[in-house]
Image (cartoon, rainbow, N blue to C red):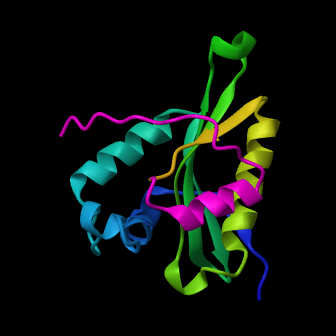
Amino acid sequence: MSAITFRTAVKADLPAIVAMLADDEFGEFREKPGETVRKEYEIAFEEMSRDPGNRILLAEMDGEMVGSLQLVFMPSLSRGGTKRAIIEAVRVASKFRGHNIGTELMKHAIAESRAAGCGLVQLTSDKRRTRAHLFYRRLGFEQSHIGFKLDLV
């Protein structure tokens, strides 16, 4: 297998990112992929791009996108003012799952979080994603909290 490289997404990556988000048993009903991305995705990406602490991190092999996640650095007053990283929307392209890409992508995101001065990395995962929970535990994450969401749409 070729080496995995990492980079920050640019607007031209949006169709592939949305397709990867939809290539999932839960995302297939939430996301709207296509060759032309919906305006809502473009607006969200532009807003994220203006925030230096918010980006989409991509994993590539031989120029092909094989994984992505959103990485956000957030200052916080809790824990003595500890800056934290939030990882969201972790995906590996279905044909590349099981090849350690998710592990390498997460390790890279954690290393970037350390380099940014974060003292904590946190994420949420749908309670139905039991395999993902095992994956995060293998990376050293503790299932320490109960999460809540309020859908406003």
The image shows residue 32, relative to residue 89, as above or below, that is below
125 lies left or right of 63: left
Camera-side residue: 93 or 151? 151
The image shows residue 82, relative to residue 60, as above or below, that is above
Q: Residue 58 occupies which quadrant of the picture? A: bottom right
Res. 124 visible in picture: yes
Task: State the residue lying farthest toward the left.
Answer: 153
Q: Residue 26 occupies which quadrant of the picture? A: bottom left
Res. 118 visible in picture: no
The image position of residue 48, as x and y in percent, is: 45, 40
The image shows residue 77, relative to residue 146, as above or below, that is above
Camera-side residue: 80 or 53? 80
The image position of residue 67, as x and y in percent, is: 58, 69
Residue 145 is covered by the magenta coloring: yes
Q: Quadrant of the C terminus?
A: top left
Rendered residue at 74%/40% (across/down)? 113
7 lies left or right of 139: left
The image position of residue 93, as x and y in percent, is: 52, 77
The image position of residue 112, as x and y in percent, is: 75, 45
The image shows residue 67, relative to residue 108, as above or below, that is below
Q: Quadrant of the N terminus?
A: bottom right
Highlighted magenta segment, given as a residue range: 127-153
Rendered residue at 74%/10% (across/down)? 80
Rendered residue at 41%/72% (across/down)? 24
User: How many numbered marks, from 0 up?
Assistant: 0
54 lies left or right of 61: left
143 lies left or right of 90: right
Q: Main secondary structure of the magenta part?
A: loop
Residue 61 is covered by the magenta coloring: no
